[in-house]
Image (cartoon, rainbow, N blue to C red):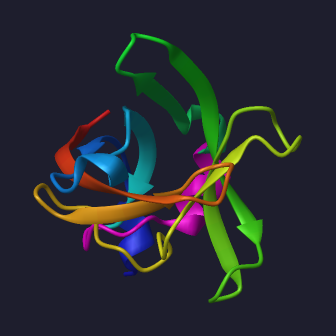
Amino acid sequence: MHDDDHAHLTRIELEPAPGPKEHAADHSYSFVAPLSIGGTLDLNAWKAKRALCFVHRVGRDGDIRHGLLMHRAGGTSGSTWVFDYELGRGEEEAGFRFETHRFIEGGYVAIRDEDGLAHTFRVASVKPA
């Protein structure tokens, strides 16, 4: 049996990581994704459940952007996970090495915004969706 046989939809909350104020993100994320038992994003489960894999980007001012978690060709390892806000029109933010990252509470991830700037986030919670 493979990890993807046990993948389940999970709500992941990301908050700006502590650090220098000039590099801190001014938003947080809440997204739903299928995770394997090991805590990695599960591509096969995502293909079956992609319509349920949404993201909310919440600004400090309360502004919320809604989008989808998408898998795209390209990137350093041949593919990239992105938050797509305009369905293929270039309003994307790419997760840095999301394809191999384990999403566990207290861990850190990096996301590159539409302007190409990378920001670090702390995984605040990982709970069943």
Task: Specify the quadrant that holds the C terminus.
Answer: top left
Quick check: 87 left or right of 84? right
Quick check: 37 left or right of 90? left
| 41 shown above or below 59 | below
Furthest residue in direction bottom, as rendered:
77
Does the stretch in magenta take in 13?
A: no
Task: Specify the quadrant that holds the N terminus.
Answer: bottom left
**Residue name at image x 79 percent, y 32 percent:** 86
| 4 shown above or below 89 | below
Q: Where in the figure is residue 110, as x and y percent of width and height? A: 40, 63
Image quadrant assignment for residue 61: top left
Q: Which residues are magenta?
A: 37-49
Quick check: 108 left or right of 60? left
**Residue name at image x 36 percent, y 74 percent:** 101
Give whichever of 108, 79 is nearer the camera: 108
Image quadrant assignment for residue 36: bottom left
Does the stretch in magenta take in 46?
A: yes
Furthest residue in direction top, as rendered:
62
**Residue name at image x 68 percent, y 48 percent:** 114
Q: Where in the figure is residue 112, as x and y percent of width and height? A: 55, 59
